[in-house]
Image (cartoon, rainbow, N blue to C red):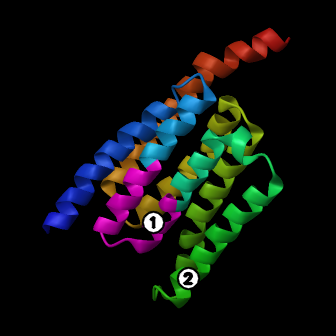
Amino acid sequence: MTGFEIAGQIISIAAMGCNIISYQQKKESHLVACQLIGGALFSLSFFLLGATVGGLLNLVAAVRAVIFLFSEKLHASHPAWLCGFIACYVAFYILTFTVFGVEPKPITLLIEVLPVIGMTALSVGFMKGDSGAVRKAGLVSSPAWLIYNIYYLSIGAIICEAISLCSIFIGMLRHDRGEEKEDK
C-alpha cells in the first residue's frame, strides 16, 4: 500500500465519523455542517485512493452542503440548485464511461448509477429544509452507496454506510418519532 493509499484510508475514517454523527444532529445546520466536512474528507480520500468519480461526486456533495448551510443567503430552495446538482451527477455518470474508461456493461451501468441516485435523494432531502427529511432521504442514499461500495469491496465505505443506516434509524427514533406525536 502506498503512502497516498494509507492517507486516503485514514482520511476516510475521519469522513466516516463526520457522516455518522451528522444524523444525530437535531438542528439542520449542524447536520449539514457535519455532512459538509464528511463530503470534503471523502472527496479527498477518494482522490488519494485513485477513485476519481467518487472524489468528484463527494466534492459536489461538499459544495451542496455549503449551499444548504447558507440556504437563506444563497436561495438554496430555488429549483435551479436541485437541477444543477442533478445535472452534475448525471454528467459525472456519463464521464465515467466516456472519459474515465469504465466499460459500459449492463452491471457497470447499473452499479455506477447508484451513487447518482443516492446523491439525488440527499439533494432532494436538503431541499425540504429539515433534518427529518434529510434522514428520510438517507434511507435511499445509504443503501444505494452501500451496494456500490460492496460491489467495489470498499471496506471503510461499507462500514460507514452500514453505521449510517443505523444512525439514521436512531435519529428517526430520537427526533422524528416525537415530532409525529406532537403533530397529532
Magenta segment main secondary structure: helix
User: In x, y percent, where is residue 170?
Assistant: 53, 24
How crowded pointer 1 is (Cα within 10 Å; few <14, some 14-19, many 20+) is rated as many
- Residue at 55% x, 50% y: name it: 143
Are the two marked residues, 2 and 1, in contact with CB atoms closer than 8 angstroms? no
Rendered position, 75 above or below 89: above
Q: Which residue is mark 2?
A: 95
Count of residue discs? 2
On screen, residue 165 versus residue 14, left or right, reads right
User: In x, y percent, where is residue 160?
Assistant: 40, 45
The tag on residue 37 is: none
Span shown in magenta:
39-59
Q: Amino acid at mark 1?
A: Gly
Quarter location, residue 37: top left
**Distance in Å between CA atoms under marks 2 and 1:** 12 Å
User: Quick check: is 154 in the magenta stretch?
Assistant: no
**Which quadrant holds the C terminus?**
top right
Q: Which residue is mark 1?
A: 54
